[in-house]
Image (tube, rainbow, N blue to C red):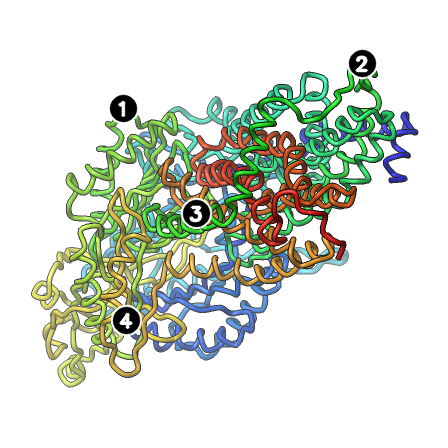
Amino acid sequence: MKLVKYFLQKKPVTILLLVLILAGGLFSYIKMGKLEDAPFTIKQALVLTPYPGASPSEVQTQVTDVLEEAIQSLGELYYLKTENRAGLSKITVYVKKEIRAEDMQQLWDKLRRKVNDVQGKLPAGAGTSIVNDDFGDVLGVFYGLTGSGYTNRQLEEQAKLIKNELLKVKDVAKIEIYGVQTPTIDITVNPSMMSQSNITTADISRAFNAQNKVTDAGGIETSANRIRIESTGNFYSLDDIRNLTIVSRTGEHFRLADIADIRESYQTPASNLMKIDGEPGIGIAISTVPTGNVVDMAALVKEKIDSFRETMPEGFELVSIYDQGYESDVANQGFILNLIISVVTVVAILLFFIGFKNGILVGSGLIFSIFATLIVMYAQGIALQRMSLAAIIIAMGMLVDNAIVVSDSALVNMQRGMRKRVAILKACGATALPLLAATFIAILTFLPIYYSPHITGELLSSLVVVIGVSLMFSWVFALTQTPFFIQEFVRRPRPEELKGELFSGKVYDRFRQSLRFVIRHKSVTISCLVVLLVASAVSFRYIPKVFVPALDKQYFTVDMWLPEGTRIEETERIATEISDYIEKKEETETVSTFVGRTPPRYYLSNVAFGPQSNYAQILVKCETSKLSRKLHAELQEEIPAQFPEPFIKVNKFELSPLTEAVIEARFLGPDAAVLDSLTGLALEVMRNNPKVDHARNEWGNMALMIRPVYDPVKAGALGITKSAMMESVKSINDGLPVGIYRDREKQVPVLLKSSGANVQDAESLGDFAVWNGDRSAPLSQVTKEIETTWEYPQIRTYNRQLSMAAMCGVRPGHTMAEVHGEIRKEIEAIQLPEGYTFFWDSQYKDQGEALQAIAKFFPLAFLLLVVILVALFGNFRQPVIILCVLPLSLIGVAIGMLLTGFDFGFFPIAGWLGLLGMIIKNVIVLIDEINALKRSGMPVYESIIEATVSRTRPVLMAATTTIFGMIPLLWDIAFQGMAATIIFGLTFATLLTLFVTPALYALFYKVKPNSAPLPRR
């Protein structure tokens, strides 16, 4: 107690330290980073490899398999998922969840080396593999540029001007532009003209390369200088291309414009498209540097954007699609308001229990604990965001708990006639060690969450740290600031004000009678609670279970898939119809449409899809979150009825990444046909359940394919090679690359296309003329047959095995756990042939991993808890009493969840773990008081009664402050389940502390009324 005595005696030092804490906390709050949500690491990377002309099967066997073999040697690898489409290999690399965020970049460098090492083993024609390890970066400030009457190229040029200026803004890290159309130069020729001119595609390509190649022309030297000679003759305009001379194989010279039509165009099919409120647009997505403040950066960007709006040519318009800075600011303001309400509520309750002066005294410790915590948060780089602010609110009641116990003990000592400083020092000496142990145990209950390697553990890590730091500060201030304030501001009672008997009166007498009744019927009481505990455990099956809650935002998304093989233009048409339908709703503020693939990751939990020509995403922004909820519910019912052809998902924003489907039954094996059969059986089970929504095959539908079978005999007679045949076919729509046109910093592909080609089926394709430079002939004359067949447009694998999943969603009003429980047994009963395996993927797998990650460190936390309790009490019986109380808290939790109707998931589990710490803290202080009274010579029975009575006020104060402090979180959709768990759990746990703990103590020590003191052990 020397430290306590020092602070009581050294008044200037104590005042200085307290003032510095207040000033440091205020400074930290102003300077610290502000985010909307806690950051977490996306532990995935993409490896993309183009292989033009290859089928999905060829891509899988010739490219993907080679790369997977190299990647699987990574020791940190968790598993691989691949998606193989015509001409493209897409490998998603998932690394072990135990890998720390700071080690990720080094790991991605290892992955890049592994991929680069096998590039030589890829087949000829395959492009260079690209390792995208930053697709998890958040570009949270997202603007859209539209331009009525402007071309795509003019939109792109304006977007680049804006990008270059925004890169100069403080704390801007990088900027991505979305929706840019790849420009091309189209050379449209007639096949018959090519044949008559004896010109081949190789002749045109050779002419392009010869003239457009950048060549070093050297220089000349004078007596003193060297003068560089510039190479000229490159293409600087379309006229230069038109005037290009082509030499045929017979030596004739042709001007390119005389045999072809040359014009600027765009790549077909487009890779992605974007619209904002129905107008074609381009997205400009901006990220913040890791150490930056997104709120400040977004404000600076907005200032720059406002200046652009004034200076841009008429017709251009910049629209805010998503502003993470604004969202973070709004979220922080809402939580700060909740925090202020919680602080005021807690102080008001203290005033009610212990009067104005004492209430302010204890409440001041809460302020000092919060401000000291802000200093540590700033020093450790923990931003103000949803989790860290919620942590302070959750810890609110616990923060005053230590001060309540110390101040109450000191006040009681003074009521007993002790001098003020003696009363203070005795109170601190008696409570310091029990409170330290209780505080440490309260922190310890969160240990499994903090060390969880799962994404949920990372998401809640700042919550755990802030709770732990603030609780330790509350203990420190309870033994320093609280005694000091009692010494300076609390008057010692005068002799005539001293009570003859403490804890007397009708209320206390009735409470003593209730305690005696419970202790006399302790066996019955405990038996009834055991029955209630069993009933509560059974009742959990009726509580809806959602692992991670959705967020209450003014945004939501609509994902749309059309059948595989759909043209991107058709996808754009239907997506535009849906966007127009949504835009007409009065709740809608802005509608942004992204076709072909998802936009840059403007929100951390967003999931990426594409490139897929049959996919589109619509981002809907409403004026308020309330209107967003209303429109979201309406569209879930209306959209499928209005647009029955596509598969449509209406999604809320969530804290953790969304999955492609809510439920996935995944089959693995060597044969796609067998996998398709197994998946079909699972889909039949899903479709028979009325709660299932949109059951589908992961691979999608079979797509139509035309296969011209080359005939070497017939084609050889005409001198047409397979390569010439396929090049001619490619010129129908996509265009055959024959050169590069350098347009400033861009390299624009020059594509050769056939004129007059109106090919839409196998028959018209057979009439299409192919050429070789000497002659042309219909395709049907150089092939054995032109067959129409069906193929899987994509082939997926999981850890190098063919993989196919039966996927489905859940209808509104139902949960994944509910539907999965109903279809699980029937799907798991499907007989698997030898060599085939099955597992549940998606949310079920992710939730299981999250719970396993918590359970991994739970034994360690429990062992440390037991060690501390045994060390504190010096026996085994009293720790066992405490452990017996803990499970009974589930009764209150179950009642709370059933009454409120809130979902039970990971956050309520985290809240329950914190609740255990609160219960242990109260019970430790109560048992310690019983032991103290026993040591003073009081009979054991009376010790139990009087200790419980004396602890009633601090226990009720601590519980009430915590409960009322949590009430603001009941209206936060993310934390309402956690809040209900703590509020109802702690309410019931308070009764456990005041009634069940004495009954258990009497039961374990076989105490009977008026029994003599127990001997010390």
Residue 893, quarter of picture: top left
Dot 4: what SS? loop
The image shows residue 1015 at horizontal and vertical percentages of 75, 54
Q: Are marks 1 and 3 in contact (CB under 8 Å)?
A: no
Residue type at mark 1?
Answer: Glu
| N-term-proximal mark, 4 vs 2 | 4
Residue at position x 15%, y 81% in the image: 711
Camera-nearest label, 1 or 2 = 2
Can you give x and y, in whole percent of width and height, for residue 228 in the image? Answer: 63, 56
Q: In the rendering, which numbered label is found on residue 528?
A: 3
Instruction: Calculate the distance from the C-alpha at mark 2 to the C-alpha at mark 3.
Output: 47 Å
Query: What is the distance, in whole Å, between disc 4 and disc 1 at their CAs?
Result: 47 Å
Q: Which residue is mark 4?
A: 55
In the picture of the structure, the residue carrying the numbered disc 1 is 586
Rendered position, 666 above or below 784: above
- Residue 148 locus on image (x, y percent): 32, 29
The residue carrying mark 2 is 496
Give left or right: position of 75 versus 576: right
Instruction: Judge whether residue 721 can be spotted in this image.
Output: yes
Q: Residue furthest bottom?
A: 713
> Which of pointers 4 and 3 lies earlier in the amino acid sequence?
4
Asked whether 568 or 199 is in front, the reply is 568
Please tell me which residue lies in front, 745 or 466: 466
Q: CA distance from mark 4 to mark 3?
A: 68 Å
Q: Residues within 10 Å of mark 3 (few under 14, many from 20)?
A: few
Circle 4 or circle 3, nearest the eye:
3
